[in-house]
Image (tube, helix red, strand yellow):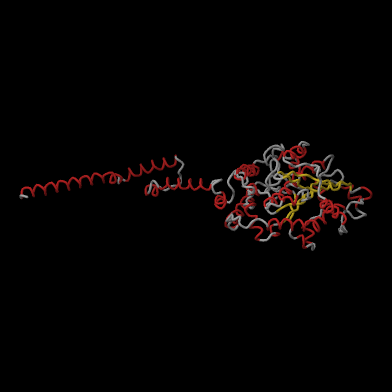
Amino acid sequence: MSSAQKAATRKRSRTLEAEQAADLRRSKRPRKAVQQPLAVQQAEGRKRRLNISESGATGVSRKRARHNPDKAVIDSSAEQEEADNVDGQKDPILYWTKTGHWPEGYSEQSDNDMSHLLARQKSSGSLRRKKSALVSVDLASVAPSSTTPSDQKPREVKSAPYQDPRYKLLLSTKGSFMEKSDLDITQKSKKSYLNLFDAKQTVPKDTLFRNDLFERTCQNIQDKNETRVIRDISLLVVPSAETLATYGADHLNILIESTNEGWNNSLPLTGTRPQPDFSVGFKREAFTKEQLDKLAPFIGNFISGDQSYFMATYYMYFPFLTCEVKCGAAALDIADRQNAHSMTLAVRATVELFRLVGREMELHREILAFSISHDHRSVRIYGHYPVIDGKDTKYYRHPIHTFDFTALDGREKWTAYKFTKNVYDIWMPNHFKRLCSAIDSIPADLDFSVPQLSQSFGLSQDLERHQLSWSSQQSTGGARDTTPNTSFTGRVV
């Protein structure tokens, strides 16, 4: 190659390098253009913030968005994809561990036989209604009645749906019948409740039912309201399990009771929430840690109000006795409807527990709960039981005894008292063993990966919120609930 050719080759190489350098500079120009004067950057920053605000992405820092503009979109997509993956059908257990409640509609849609037993979060609508009731109370619209805490209704209000005779028909559409089944109860149950009348019991001495005071006591409560009847004689008709335990009946320490308190933690049967004058069930401490762990997926976040088959209030498991007190003509019919509703939920709890472990036929036609209705002179005692046909369960009541305790100089004034004490002393221990046996039979391989309550549900935060809610209620001056829609076909109130 001649010297002239070599020189030409070097010239072409330098030209090519110059062109490549120019191309490189041109490719870098857009990035340099971002470095604009401060005023321009601030104007564009304001524009970007406006766009972010309009699109709903508030709270995202401008620095982070400029650092990686695609990260928010990627994170959002990943988060949505994760939510889709755990939503409902794909992984309901993972959803439960992340949120503390089961996916909406999961119980109804799953074919799993036990899916309907899983705890359900209380609807936000109910919570909103409850909050609005604290600040929207028309005191003039509420008739004078006994004052109750904010989550309870005055006695007149809670009884309103049951005053309609059609409520009995409504219960029948739900599989609950205020009558005997054609199959009747088992002979075992019949002998059991008859024994509750025959077994000897002690009665208190210095009470208003004392022989020399009884007649005057009955006269004093004639034509009086429910509160007066409850105050003077209810504990002499249906004794308190907790009071008996306080006086030394240690075997009753596993029981807990409620008075005029709504069963907020029980899955509803109709549009009306049960709120018995008096009810008895088992306290949380009655069960072992292993038993509570097995029940955990089915009771959910009971502190926050999750609803389940197995609880009545947030502190009462498996209720088995209710009492309703009334006064006035035909009032006991209303009490019977209230008790029938409450005891259907109580019997349902036991049936669903046994169905979970495949032992439901052990309960067929067996009395699983009792109810007592009374006024200033009359008492009605019922036993409640299921009739099971495969997956179909219907609920019935058995009339055990009806009497006037003022008749024959008060010959039967202690009948209901002794019967109830024998329910506590004789029937309840066997029923509790039966429940524990079923709970222990829940398969151990049902691994729901349930964290401890304080971790999974944020117990301390829940209690703090409840304290704040109570402070808010106090600030309203103890206002009562507004009168709810009393239509028994309406939504749960």
Q: Position of residue 266 (x, y in %)?
A: 68, 48
Rendered-image quadrant of the C terminus: top right
Q: Position of residue 419 (x, y in %)?
A: 84, 54
Q: Quadrant of residue 460?
A: bottom right
| Residue, far right | 408
Q: Is residue 345 left or right of residue 378?
A: left
Q: How many marks?
A: 0
Q: Position of residue 452 (x, y in %)?
A: 59, 58
Q: Is residue 465 left or right of residue 156?
A: left
Q: Position of residue 15 (x, y in %)?
A: 14, 46
Q: Residue at x 5, y 48 (%)?
A: 4
Q: Nearer the viewer, residue 341 or 142?
A: 341
Q: Nearer the viewer, residue 82 or 361?
A: 361
Q: Residue at x 63, y 55 (%)?
A: 296
Q: Quadrant of residue 393?
A: top right
Residue 290, relative to residue 138: is it above or below? below
Residue 1, relative to residue 171: is it above or below? below
Q: Is residue 332 left or right of residue 115?
A: right
